Image (spheres, rainbow, N blue to C red):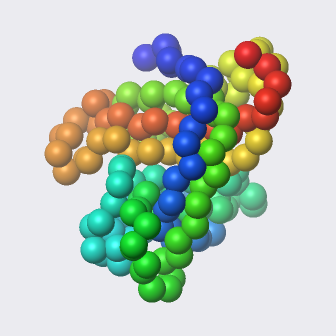
């Protein structure tokens, strides 16, 4: 697949419970599901949407990650899980259908499209995992929504 649906959206503020980490690039496939499970356990599975990973671009081969779930106001987990609010923002939103290993290609396509349209990154992208791999057996059917915050300029 080479088509990627992109749209510019106003993304609402979200209250999230998360674990922060510095992860070697080659361990992301282990750390993301582990931290999703650890946060799910800490919040007693009380969430208001799908799990997510907010990922800083690699620095020396390491990603800075925030992995967790959006949560209702009365969820107050213990450390190392913390609660914060992701502010409302303007974002380029893409739906990636396919294996997680192909997300890098979607990011490259998004970055190219943003450059062509004069859109400027205003923060780290967030991946929302709309598909549960335990319920969707084929990775080519996984749905991941990528929200990449942008500034006010560009169309």
Residue drawn at (79%, 20%), measured in percent from left and top? 154
The one of 18 and 56 positioned closer to us in this rendering: 18
Residue 115 image position (x, y, % from top left): 78, 21
Residue 133 image position (x, y, % from top left): 25, 47
> Is 18 above or below relative to 49?
below
Residue drawn at (49%, 14%), measured in percent from left and top? 3
> Is 29 above or below relative to 4?
below
Residue drawn at (28%, 74%), measured in percent from left and top? 44
Q: Which of the 4 image quarters holds residue 12?
A: top right
In this rendering, does residue 94 appear at all? yes
In this rendering, does residue 107 appear at all? no
Q: Quadrant of the N terminus?
A: top left
**Residue at the front extreme?**
73
The one of 90 and 107 positioned closer to us in this rendering: 90
**Residue at the bottom extreme?**
78
Q: Which of the 4 image quarters holds residue 104?
A: top right
Residue 42 image position (x, y, % from top left): 35, 78
Q: Quadrant of the C terminus?
A: top right
Residue drawn at (60%, 55%), measured in percent from left and top? 86
Q: Horizontally, is 89 left or right of 119 in the view?
A: left
> Is 19 above or below relative to 90?
below
Q: Horizontally, is 58 left or right of 33 in the view?
A: right
The one of 10 and 59 positioned closer to us in this rendering: 10
Residue 43 image position (x, y, % from top left): 34, 73
Q: How many marks?
A: 0
> Is 30 above or below relative to 124?
below
The one of 135 and 59 positioned closer to us in this rendering: 135
């Amino acid at each position: 697949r080479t088509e990627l649906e992109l749209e510019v959206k106003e993304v609402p503020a979200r209250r999230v419970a998360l674990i922060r980490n510095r992860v070697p690039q080659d361990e992301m496939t282990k750390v993301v599901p582990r931290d999703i499970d650890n946060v799910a356990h800490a919040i007693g599975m009380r969430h208001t949407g799908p799990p997510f990973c907010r990922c800083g671009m690699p620095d020396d081969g390491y990603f800075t990650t925030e992995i967790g779930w959006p949560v209702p106001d009365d969820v107050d987990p213990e450390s190392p899980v913390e609660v914060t609010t992701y502010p409302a923002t303007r974002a380029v939103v893409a739906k990636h259908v396919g294996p997680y290993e192909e997300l890098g290609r979607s990011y490259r396509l998004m970055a190219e499209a943003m450059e062509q349209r004069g859109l400027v990154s205003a923060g780290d992208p967030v991946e929302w995992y709309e598909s549960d791999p335990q319920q969707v057996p084929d990775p080519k059917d996984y749905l991941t929504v990528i929200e990449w915050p942008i500034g006010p300029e560009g169309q």
